[in-house]
Amino acid sequence: MIKVVIDGQTYQVDVEDIHARPVVAVIEGERYEVWPEAEASAPALASAAPEQVVARAAAPAQPQSAAGGGKTLTAPLPGVIVAIAAKPGDAVTKGQELCTLEAMKMKNAIRSGRDGVIASIEVAVGDQVSHGQVLMTFGD
């Protein structure tokens, strides 16, 4: 168990086998799969600075219900939105990258947890988001 402090808030993180792909991390009881990517080979990766490693984190498997009966995609961790790959009206599939969130100098691809149509985007590039904040809403 690792304790991580971000913006003064402490999170408990449990990382399963760091050598497995995907790497499984449990953050505050929520399970995430992370696929580390690097331009360097695995031996070079061990000596790489954190900002040289890019990770993609899967979105939560089941989006939480939103008011009004829709579904939402929420931020899996606090960070800054650096890219948005979807727009309202887009039909998306489960696993499709919808936006990129940067946290602790690592870029995390936030992916759709379901098939559906994007009803609204609740954030903009450059926005600071907190854990659990709504990023996008799905239509029915």
Image (cartoon, helix red, strand yellow):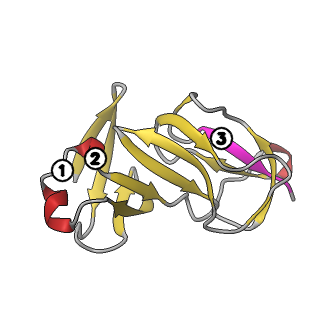
Residue 81 vs residue 129, the one in the foreground: 81
In the rendering, which numbered label is found on residue 127? none
Residue 117 drawn at (x, y percent): 82, 58
Q: Residue at x 80, y 43 (%)?
A: 120
Residue 11 drawn at (x, y percent): 34, 41
Badge nearest the viewer, 2 or 3: 2
Measured Cα–Cα span from mark 2 to mark 3:
28 Å
Residue 33 vs residue 83, the one in the foreground: 83
Q: Which amino acid does label 3 sit on?
A: Val
**Mark 1 vs 3, N-terminal side:** 1
Residue occupied by mark 1: 48
Badge nearest the viewer, 1 or 3: 1
Helix, strand or loop at mark 2: helix
Q: Is residue 136 magenta?
A: yes
Residue occupied by mark 2: 52
In this rendering, position of residue 121 left or right of residue 54 = right
Q: In which quarter of the view is residue 8 placed?
A: top left
Circles 1 and 2 in contact, beta carbons < 8 Å: yes
Residue 92 drawn at (x, y percent): 74, 63
Q: Is the magenta stretch mostly helix, strand or loop?
A: strand
**Mark 2 vs 3, N-terminal side:** 2
